[in-house]
Structure formats: C-alpha cells, structure tokens
Image: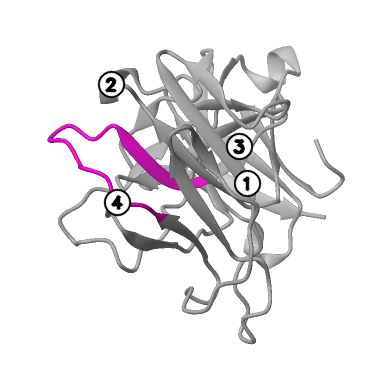
Amino acid sequence: MTSSSYQIIVRNLSQTTQYFYVFQKQAAFPLLPSSDPILSGSLGCQSVGNYATTGAQINFGLDSQVYAGVLSTRQVSLSQLIVLLSLNAATLSVVGSTSAFRAVTLTTADGSPDNCTTLTLDPLGLSAPANQAGIAIGGFGINVPSYTPLPHPELYCGVVALNNNQAVILSSFVAPVPNAVMNCIPKQIFFVKMGYQPVGSTVAYDESNAACCDFTTGYATYIVTYNANGTFSATGGP
C-alpha cells in the first residue's frame, strides 16, 4: 500500500461466520447513453467469525489514488469477468482477458491536471495521461478509438481501485462508445455488504443494507460493525 490509503476494518457481531465484500459507489459517466449499464466489481471479499469470541476482524485496504482502466475480455462471459491487474506490468492476461491501467489526476476548475489518457486497441494499452480540455470537473477522460461493438461487449473502460494485495480491480465500468471521449467521474465512497462475491467478480449494485464508508469527508479509516440484528454501523476516523 502507499502512504496515502484507505482502510476499512470489518467486525462481525453476529453469532455465525459471515462473508463480507467491498464495492465502490458507482461512478458517473456523463456522456454514456442512458440505456447502457454501469457495471461494478467486488474489490475485496473475506469471511470472519464473531468478534467478541475470536477477536478477529477484516482489514480491507484501498489506495486513494484514482486509476483509469480498460479491459478486453476476448469472449469471456460477463459472469466470468475477473479483472485483476498487476502493479508490476501495464497489462495482464486473466481468464483470456487483457487489461491496462494508468494513474490519473481528476479535473479541477482551472483544468490544469493530466486528466486524460488515450486507449489503443492493438496492442491494448493506455497512454501516459495528459491535459485535455472538455473533461468533466472531478473526473478523468479516456480517448476511445473507433471499433465495432459486439452484441455482447468485449471492451470495458472505467475506474479501477488498488487494494492492499497490490492488485488493481476494475471497480465501476462501462462498454465505451467508439470514437469518443469517455468521461468518468469516480466517487471515493465505498460500501461493505454481507455475502460472498469473489474479488474482481461483477456484482449487482445495491447500496441497501450496507455500510457506507465515505472517504470524501476526510476520513482515512472506517470501522464497520455488522450487528447481531443484521444491521450495519460505520464510524470514520483519522
């Protein structure tokens, strides 16, 4: 992990061992056709027993840096979608997929940062980010080249999140519009929910009965408690 990271500590007060997973608040994609789905990925999943009995807790760590990412699935079905990226290489083949990522800076009011990267398809990759006008404030852009979308998408772009296992996972993503600039506005807000969702798998986006960890408020750590009555509580701290 970097020195600038988020920590989510999960404690289970129920009497049975439970699985918990983490996902990020859906990013906004301002120029995406309204009919196109926004997909979400599981950023971490772990089981833990009763806190009072075992003293055990889960520590989910996430890098606070924002990354742009792209994935080519090569005939991999959406149910099999696993999108892990290695920090040691720009691309990685996972279950017949190829991926790339770049650290980006979110657009400010004066439009100054390196807020946009360019996608290449053959070979798949993302360029070093540079400043580009017209990117939404609070977001980043990906220049998407011309390509022919298929009925079952094989290309996805969006925001990725680096976890404490030194892996980057596609977190909130879409099938991009060809020959266009994809705008993505990520939100550094994460949710913890009960259930088994393997790391990198696509999850149904649902904020209900989940703990909200809002790191936009300045907190660096959240302690999430799963109560005996099946509800969650979350307390932020430095």
Q: Earlier in the sequence, mark 2 or mark 3?
A: 2
Could you tell me which residue is drawn at 63 percent across and 78 percent down?
108
Circle 4: residue type? Ser
Residue 19 seen by the camera: yes
Q: Secondary structure at mark 2?
A: helix
Mark positioned earlier in the residue sequence (4 or 1): 1
Disc 1 and disc 3: Cα gap in Å? 34 Å
Q: Quadrant of the C terminus?
A: bottom right
Amino acid type for the residue under numbered disc 1: Arg
Question: Which one is earlier in the sequence, the residue at label 1 or at label 2?
Answer: 2
Q: Is residue 196 in view?
A: no
Image quarter of the N terminus: top right
Quick check: 90 left or right of 42? right
Residue 19 drawn in magenta: no
Residue, disc 4: 146
* Numbered range of the magenta stretch: 144-159
Q: x, y (%) of residue 136? A: 47, 75
Q: Which residue is mark 2?
A: 79
For this rendering, which residue is in front, 178 or 185? 178
The residue carrying mark 3 is 225
| Scheme of colours in the image | one colour
Q: Which SS class for mark 4?
A: loop
Which residue is tagged 1?
102
Residue 218, by quadrant, is bottom right
Q: Nearer the viewer, mark 1 or mark 3?
A: 1
**Amino acid type, residue under disc 2 in the picture:** Ser
The secondary structure that most of the magenta stretch takes on is loop
Task: State yes or no: discs 4 and 3 in contact (Cβ < 8 Å).
Answer: no
Q: Earlier in the sequence, mark 4 or mark 2?
A: 2
Disc with the residue nearer the chain's start (1 vs 3)? 1
Q: Are marks 4 and 2 in contact (CB under 8 Å)?
A: no
Residue 200 % position (x, y): 47, 26
